[in-house]
Image (cartoon, grey):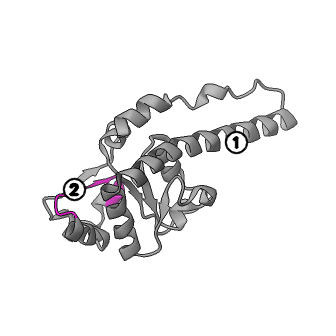
Amino acid sequence: KEVFPLVLKEIPSAEFCLAGSVGLVKPVEKLAQSTQCIRLGIVKDLKELYHAADVVINPDPNGTGIAIKSVEALSFSKPLVTSVRGARGLTEAAGRAFLVAGDSKSFANAIVDLLEDKSLYRKLCLNAFDFASLYQERNRQQLNNLLNHHCKTQAVPANIFQANRDSVISSSL
């Protein structure tokens, strides 16, 4: 409700899609009255939405644990702007694979920068997928180590994270 009007001042043609239950809550009703704001509600398969998005945001004002929504966006090679909470457990890639914003103005500025600076946009697209892949591989290895230590089981397959980097990136650019 605070960020989108700031983005519109700089990029009047910008559109804002709200996916999930966040689009159904009272605080976004005024924002949702804009013809440039589309409330999608709960979306069962986000692949098409990710492919259509130019920038993904995760304002995540109050979550716990790892920022799985952020990892998901990165795995689609999408430039991501997130809050400090949305970057939980991922800070090593901040500024390289995604941008972190601490307030509404910096959030809007980061979105505008990504939409206007194609070099920054491309850099984040490339680094996003690489970081998500590395993150997934590290977690797969940790899971294998844990399973091997506590029980006899087959290793978690390396290709558990299925994505063709080139096709994902080319569809993003």
Point out the tag, 2 or 1, that comes first from the N-terminus.
2
**Residue in the foreground of this view, choosing between 149 and 129:** 129
Crowd around label 1: few <14 · some 14–19 · many ≥20 (10 Å): few
Residue, disc 2: 15
Q: Amino acid at mark 2?
A: Glu
**Vertical side of 130 occupied by 97: above or below:** below
Q: Quadrant of residue 154?
A: top right
Residue 79 lies left or right of residue 128; in this view the side is: left
Q: Amino acid at mark 1?
A: Arg
Determine the CA span between mark 2 and mark 1. 36 Å
Residue, disc 1: 138
Crowd around label 2: few <14 · some 14–19 · many ≥20 (10 Å): some
Where does residue 140 sit, x and y in percent of width and height? Answer: 69, 37
Where does residue 45 sit, x and y in percent of width and height? Answer: 37, 37
Label drawn at residue 37: none
| SS label for mark 2 | loop
Q: Residue at x 50, y 41 (%)?
A: 75
Task: Specify the segment rendered in magenta.
Answer: 11-22
Q: Residue at x 59, y 39 (%)?
A: 133
